[in-house]
Image (cartoon, helix red, strand yellow):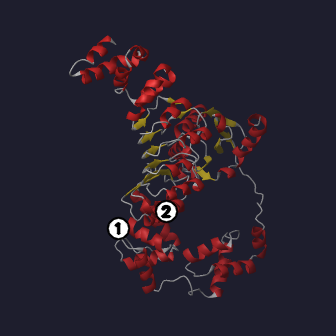
Amino acid sequence: MTDILMCAFQPSFADDLKKKVSLEIPCNYSSLLDLPEELVIMVLSYIPVSELLYTVCKICRGLKDVVRKMQSLWTIVEFDDSYTIDIAMMEMIVKNNQLVCLNLSNQNITFGSHRFTKLMLKLTPTIQELYVAETPLNNLAFVMSLRNLTTLDISATSINDNQVVILSHASQLRHLYISFTKVTAATIADLSRNFKFLVIFDACQIYFMFTDICLIVSSCEQLRFLHVSFFSQFDIDQAVQTYYKMADTVNPLRYPGDTASTDELVAYYFTSSYTAKEIAGFLLFVHNKFVSVKTVYRMMKRLRLRRYGAESPLINIVQKIIQLHKQGYSNIGYRAMWKILNSCCGINATQETVRIALKAIHYDGVVTRSRRRLVRRRYCNLGPNFCIHIDGYDKLKPFGISVHGALDGFSRKIIWLTASHTNKNPRNVALNFVEFLRQSKRVPRLVRSDAGTENVIIRSIQIALRAVHNDNMSGYRSFSEGRSTGNQRIEMLWSFLCPYFTTF
């Protein structure tokens, strides 16, 4: 420490001081308390902010007053993975009035979502970049006070559509990172009119999301960069080919080819029941042809493509509905039947006509569906290790406990039931699955989970291990995603867990 003090009186003390600080200061912070306050501030200015905050909150409380005077010098605060953020450290961060960039992504935060959201409300309005991926954030109310915020990363958080609507008031927001599985395409399309930079993570359901991505592109008037991260098994060319291969099987008008004229492409997408905005998105994103929405409307009018006033004869509609009922479509409603008739069968019909026809053809089915009562169904499982159900339990999150579990659907045996600080990290969840595979030395035939981002690594592992099998559930069919409330077996476990363990 004497050498550091002597360096302050040398002409080139800055470089020597930096070397001394990097070698000696991290080992003995408490010795700084013996130096004058001005020299302490000079020494601490060469130490990373995250390491200094960690030291003040965990090791040397006597430096807290000095650090508060240095907060006006900090504009960027970010942490390595080795630090643990507690309430004291978070309070020191939010009190900085000069903060411009804050990165809390993938950090081990020791307090719950309610306290974290409450502290986020105290952020300074000067902040411009905020990264809070994989944090216990569940509310975006603090965005209303951040008038200068241009970049926001809320991927892998508990944010849903109701909260994302708040971002519609943040007109200054330009860069948004968000998990696509947590927010629908329509919400992103409504919010992305001012975006110049848009990243969509974990676009796993390529068959259904490709049209959604085109909808987003057609809505982004100022978009200059778009990145969609598929799984390693997909690339964008394969996605386009897969989409057109499926489209050829359901569209009565065959795909005209990549070299087709714009009129032929508009007619093809129109017969697939796409709107003018979606057609413009396909032309731009797939065929590299910029056509405005108004021009698409004019082309549809010139080609006499219309959905109103061009209904097929009633006898053809009734015959096709009866034919579809015989093929196994007897339990779908009139909206789904209308979609199939117009997009797959080449028949133009209004929803009102389809509704009246269904009521005349299958009156009992219409009455049953109108009651909106769940019809009890049978759960079928062929044996042990046939289907395992995985899910997370968040009722204890206010106390800092996140539970994740899995059980066998046939025997109801609990495969794993772990408690940790988070159940949203895909790596932590995948470790449980890998340990199960190592102990049992066999791969389950089917894995059932919800569409959360914490299951993406398990999905990749399951599909990769089942890719070489030849049964009817191999490959991509070996992983099933659906609503969390429909995951019957694991929800039964949570219903038992609530009265016996989590209700105090």
Other-residue count near label 2 (Cα within 10 Å), few / some / many at <14 / 14–19 / ≥20 = some
Element under disc 2: helix
- The earlier-in-sequence mark between 2 and 1 is 2
- Percent x, y for residue 388? 65, 43
Q: Quadrant of residue 256?
A: bottom left
What residue occupies the far top of the structure in this picture?
2
Question: Relative to 493, does residue 205 appear above or below in the rendering?
Answer: below
Q: Is residue 183 visible?
A: no
Q: Is residue 357 visible?
A: yes
Nearest to the eye among marks 2 and 1: give it: 2
What residue occupies the far left of the structure in this picture?
11
Quadrant holding the C terminus: top right
Other-residue count near label 1 (Cα within 10 Å), few / some / many at <14 / 14–19 / ≥20 = few
Q: Is residue 322 left or right of residue 213?
A: right
- In the depicted view, which residue is nearer to us: 195 or 481? 195
Q: Which residue is mark 1?
A: 288
- Percent x, y for residue 62? 48, 19
- Percent x, y for residue 13? 24, 21
Q: Residue at x 39, y 65 (%)?
A: 285
Q: Which residue is mark 2?
A: 189
Q: Is residue 194 left or right of residue 404?
A: left
Q: Residue at x 79, y 73 (%)?
A: 364
Q: Is residue 240 left or right of residue 408?
A: left
Name which residue type carries label 1: Asn
- Between the residue at mark 2 and the residue at mark 1, the CA separation in whole angstroms equals 20 Å
Name which residue type carries label 2: Ala
Question: Relative to 446, does residue 215 appear above or below in the rendering?
Answer: below
- In the depicted view, which residue is nearer to us: 470 or 204? 204
Q: Which mark is residue 383?
A: none
